[in-house]
Amino acid sequence: MLSRTTVSLDHATSSERFKSAAVDITVFVTIFLISIPLVNQLLARFDHAEFTVLWMLFFFLGYENIPVCLWGQSLGQKICGLKVVDAQGRKPGVLPILHRWCLKIMFGTRSYRPASNGDSVSEAHDKATGVYVVRARTS
């Protein structure tokens, strides 16, 4: 029997979000470090550093955004039981996900520190793009 994922309205805590980000960063760095020699071998015949830079940008942009656009969660979020949804509880579109990612990059590590009003800065980049990180349950 197939399992169906339903999204609870229970917002993820800063701790849960930090754990999922730690998983994502670990996986990202591992894959990236393993792939550099392979990519350099493939691109060596072009003799242009721009191709390596383009690969780095594509990988950096795609690692989190492609899974979130396709399935509503990155690998770290999947492992930690979190999901990115819009106000209706559905998977957000591509533009809100890319906008959210750009804001996350701008906020950097401040995304995981609580603000003075009790909200975390990470909630700000979600609120600005109309998405939420919630706990996902399989039922």
Image (tube, grey):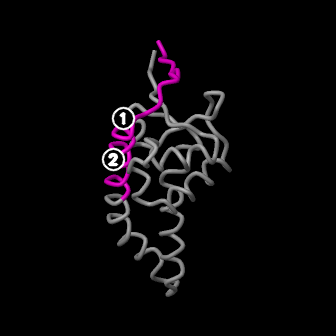
Q: Nearer the viewer, residue 55 or 40?
A: 55
Q: Is residue 84 left or right of residue 94?
A: left
Magenta segment = 1-28
Residue 66 in picture, x, y percent from top left? 55, 49
> Seen in the image, is 102 located left or right of residue 118?
right
Estimate the x, y position of residue 117 in percent, counting from the top left: 46, 44
Q: Amino acid at mark 2?
A: Val
> Which quadrant holds residue 82?
top left
**In the picture shown, does residue 50 fall above or below 105?**
below
Q: Which residue is mark 2?
A: 23
How far apart are the two marked residues, 1 and 2, measured between alpha carbons? 9 Å
Residue 80 is tagged as 1
Q: Is residue 12 left or right of residue 26?
A: right
Residue 93, given in percent of the width and then of the height, sits at 67, 42
**Residue for point 50% across, 37% down:** 133
Mark 1: amino acid: Cys
Say whether disc 1 or disc 2 marks the residue closer to the N-terminus: 2
Which of the two residues, 137 or 105, is positioned nearer the viewer here? 105
Q: Quadrant of residue 102?
A: bottom right
Q: Is residue 20 above or below residue 37?
A: above
Q: Residues within 10 Å of mark 2 (few under 14, many from 20)?
A: some
Q: Residue at x 45, y 82 (%)?
A: 44
Q: State yes or no: residue 129 in magenta.
A: no
The residue tagged with tag 2: helix, strand or loop? helix
Which residue is located at x 46 percent, y 42 percent?
A: 119
